[in-house]
Image (cartoon, grey):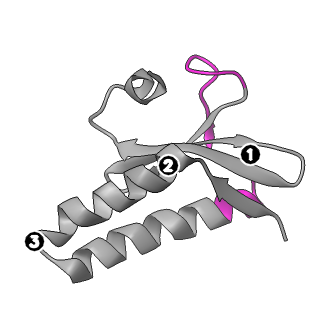
Amino acid sequence: MREARLSPAARRQIADIWYFIAEESERSADKVINGILDAIDLAAENPNMGSPRDDIQDRLRMLVVGSYLAFYRPEVEMIWVAAVVHAMREPKSWLD
């Protein structure tokens, strides 16, 4: 089974998403984060399922998960998740 590895930035972003949503509802926050993580796990098993985003970075792919985007790069035995951001953010903003 292929795995997904989260960059430190992606881990921080996922935590930030949870805390932001949890201010209103921890249950909703759990649901959103579980959906994001489930989609990332699915992408690990099917690394070409995301949309190519070579315009942002070579070999980068993007998953749309509700209001969030997960950016990842397929590697030999895993996917490397570079970022998880709200869809309203400028895609290149998390690269800085």
Residue placed at 30% from the left, 65% from the top? 18
Residues at discs 1 and 3 in contact (Cβ within 8 Å):
no
Residue placed at 59% from the left, 47% from the top? 7
Residue placed at 85% from the left, 71% from the top? 1
Q: Residues within 10 Å of mark 1 (few under 14, many from 20)?
A: few
> Does residue 72 belong to the magenta stretch?
no
- Whether residue 20 is situated above or below residue 28 in the rendered picture: above
- Residue 65 can be seen in this image: no
Q: Which residue is mark 1?
A: 48
Label the magenta part by its dominant secondary structure: loop
Q: Nearer the viewer, residue 24 or 11?
A: 11
Q: Which residue is mark 3?
A: 24
N-terminal-most mark, 2 or 1 = 2
- Whether residue 21 is situated above or below residue 82 in the rendered picture: below
With 92 as the anchor, is 25 left or right in this view?
A: left
> Does residue 43 belong to the magenta stretch?
yes
The spot of residue 19 in percent (x, y) is 24, 64
From which residue to which does the magenta span run?
42-58
N-terminal-most mark, 2 or 3 = 2
Q: Which residue is mark 2?
A: 10
The spot of residue 75 in percent (x, y) is 82, 44
Report the Cα–Cα distance between label 2 and label 3.
22 Å
Q: In the rendered image, which quarter contains the C terminus?
A: top left
* Residue type, numbered disc 1: Asn
With 32 as the anchor, is 51 left or right in this view?
A: right
Report the Cα–Cα distance between label 2 and label 1.
20 Å
- Residue 50 can be seen in this image: yes
- Whether residue 32 is situated above or below residue 81 in the rendered picture: below
* Residue type, numbered disc 3: Glu
The spot of residue 89 in percent (x, y) is 30, 32
| Quarter residue 3 falls in | bottom right
